[in-house]
Image: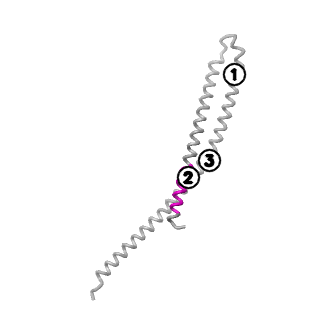
Amino acid sequence: MDRARRIKALTTLQRIKEHELDEQAAKMNVIRAAQGKLQVELDALDHRVETESEITTPEAAPYLGGFLHAVEQRRGFLNIEMQKLEEEAALIEGRLFETFAEVRTNESVLGKTLDEKRRDEDLAERTALEEVARNRYLRQMGPQT
């Protein structure tokens, strides 16, 4: 594969990997937002238990057990959902790490390839300038016999 095609392929691969990183980061943001909402609901449940678990009247006593049971069921459900989100986040973090490593490797290879291209271009330019200088010198020195 010639260098120009390699650079084009590496550049394209770099854009694809960066797009993958952006997608995975967006998914992670959605998960973190959902976790935040679940945590707010858990905190609200804790607050309700603190404020509403006192028996202020004898009529409220029979309902307290049902209320506390309902809160515990909801808390259990929310904790399960939080755990699912945490597992999904761990998978995405793993993919983010892998993709980031691939991006860094690709950047390195692309940088080296571009450096090689620049060195070759510089060498070709130097060679051309030396040729021009040599021809000019030879013309100046030419018909002195």
> Which of pointers 3 and 1 lies earlier in the amino acid sequence?
1
What is the distance, in whole Å, between disc 2 and disc 3 at their CAs? 15 Å
Q: Residue at x 56, y 48 (%)?
A: 21
Residue at mark 3: 94
Circle 3 sits in a helix, a strand or a loop, which is it?
A: helix
Q: Crowdedness of circle 1 by 10 Å Cα count: few (<14), some, many (20+)?
A: some
Tell me where residue 84 sits by quadrant.
top right
Give the percent coordinates (x, y) of residue 22: 54, 46
**Which mark's residue is nearer the viewer, 2 or 3?**
2
Magenta part of the chain: 6-20
Q: Residues within 10 Å of mark 3 (few under 14, many from 20)?
A: few
Name the residue rendered at 30%, 84% in the picture: 142
Q: Determine which residue is flagged by label 2.
A: 17
Q: Residue at x 55, y 53 (%)?
A: 16
Task: Classify residue 115 as left or right of residue 63.
Answer: left
Residue hosting label 1: 68
Q: Please say whether residue 13 is one of the residues in the magenta stretch.
A: yes
Say if mark 2 contacts mark 3, CB within 8 Å: no
- Identify which amino acid the numbered label 3 is placed on: Gly
Q: Residue 84 carries which label?
A: none
- For the residues labelled 1 and 2, the Cα–Cα distance comes to 49 Å
Report the side of 93 relative to 4 (left or right).
right
